[in-house]
Image: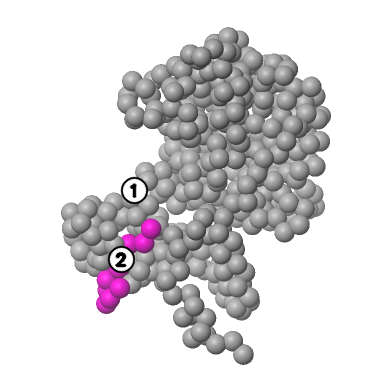
Amino acid sequence: MASADALISSLRGISATAFSSESERIRARDALLSALRAVQSPWDLAWEHNWANPAINAAISALIHAGVFTHWAAEASRLSDDACPITPARLAALTGADELLLRRLLRAVSGQHLITEVGLDTYARTAWAKTLASDPAFPSMYQGFYHELNSGMFRTLPAYLKSTGFRNPSDASDCNLQYWLGDPSTNLFRYIGTNPALTAHFNDAMECHSKYNLTPWVDVYPTDDVVISSSSSSSGFIKDDRPLVVDIGGGKGHDLKKFLDRHPSVPEGSLVLQDLPEILKTGVVVVDADGGEEGKQKAIRVQPHDFFTPQPEGCRGARLYFMHNVLHDWPDETARKILETLAPAMEKGYSRLLIHESLVSSEKPLSRVTVSDMTMMACLGAAERSEKQWEDLVASAGLRVVKMWRTVESVETIVEVERV
């Protein structure tokens, strides 16, 4: 017979910072989730899915809009107290929101252990609450990204699948998104691009996905070797002044920022950020190693580009082409066209395409990958792919997989591709 007291005692002091490495933290997290599911009753699970999750998302969003987390952070800074225990009354004075309303919202969030109740009507910040104030992109996931995109498209997915006779979706132009919006002429990126607030929130969410959910790609793929092997002289990295990295569909440029942090001495214009004009207009993360404004302009060149069209002349023959979560947005036929359009720009024996995507393992795939697969189904009629599916897709475009790079803690794999 299990002892609740013994189990609770063994978990005291556990935290995300208590492990020797990220891979150890992830192993422990997954084991704890498995244990939680084992002790939950069917009703516990139904309550979590249908009451807790939507209610808490609503409470969090309301607190963000009221400015609670930013005012709380300012108070913590003023008092030099990182946890900064605070009352709804004090937060009401800081934000101008109704005290009773804040009390109800805070106790709901505290009930999910997102903030910590440390005394009567008194709450302390957690790492999550601190991040909502310290990272400008983080709150967007609880605002437009969830309320204007995810919640709507997942709500209609079952009805859409029923309307198709439960056929597997495979057409981005005729899928659940059009069913949800009632507009057969739209697609995900047009819908996002015509709503400036949603565009900003979507880009922020993708930045957070890259920053928090994933192992940086420069820690998965050996970029040091690429920089060294690309050097045509002792003074430069680039062969014939071509770009070193072209990030195709790169959003705000967060992946190029990771490369720049690792290799701060790359020459001016050697990193190229490509995306649609409406995506680029919401702000680009371009920061050099010293954070200087002049370096921001020199390190990364921003270039509006549609990846269904050939690479511009100045970006042909680059050392690396990089696509992060691009091809999973498209069914196989469309993804093949994207690859076929890029292939002529790649120089045989020199250029590499790095496809940074989730990989569906044949046994016990990661939950974050399967959730992403459902997301692709709901908004694009697309899917995450297995190793065999990636090999087949790449080969269908006349390219070849060189190697698949992955680490224990990484959600995603880097598929290294060359021109045949």
Quarter the N terminus occupies: bottom right
Q: Please tell me whether residue 160 is drawn above or below residue 206 in the rendered image.
A: below
Q: Is residue 31 left or right of residue 174?
A: left
| Quarter where residue 44 is shown | bottom right
Could you say which is closer to the camera, residue 13 or residue 37? 13
User: Residue drawn at (54%, 12%), measured in percent from left and top?
Assistant: 233
Label 2 secondary element: strand
- In the drawing, what numbered circle is on residue 134? 1
**Would you say residue 256 is visible in this rendering?**
yes
The percent position of residue 70, horizontal first and vertical second, equals 29, 51
Q: CA distance from mark 1 to mark 2?
A: 16 Å
Q: Which residues are magenta?
A: 118-127
Crowding near the residue tagged with mark 1, few <14, some 14–19, many ≥20 C-alpha atoms within 10 Å: some
The percent position of residue 403, horizontal first and vertical second, equals 72, 36
In the image, is residue 62 part of the stretch drawn in magenta? no
**Would you say residue 172 is visible in this rendering?**
no
User: Residue drawn at (63%, 75%), measured in percent from left and top?
Assistant: 38
C-beta proximity under 8 Å, tags 1 and 2: no
Q: Earlier in the sequence, mark 1 or mark 2?
A: 2
Amino acid type at circle 1 is Ser
Amino acid type at circle 2 is Ala
Q: Which residue is mark 2?
A: 124
User: Residue drawn at (32%, 62%), measured in percent from left and top?
Assistant: 125
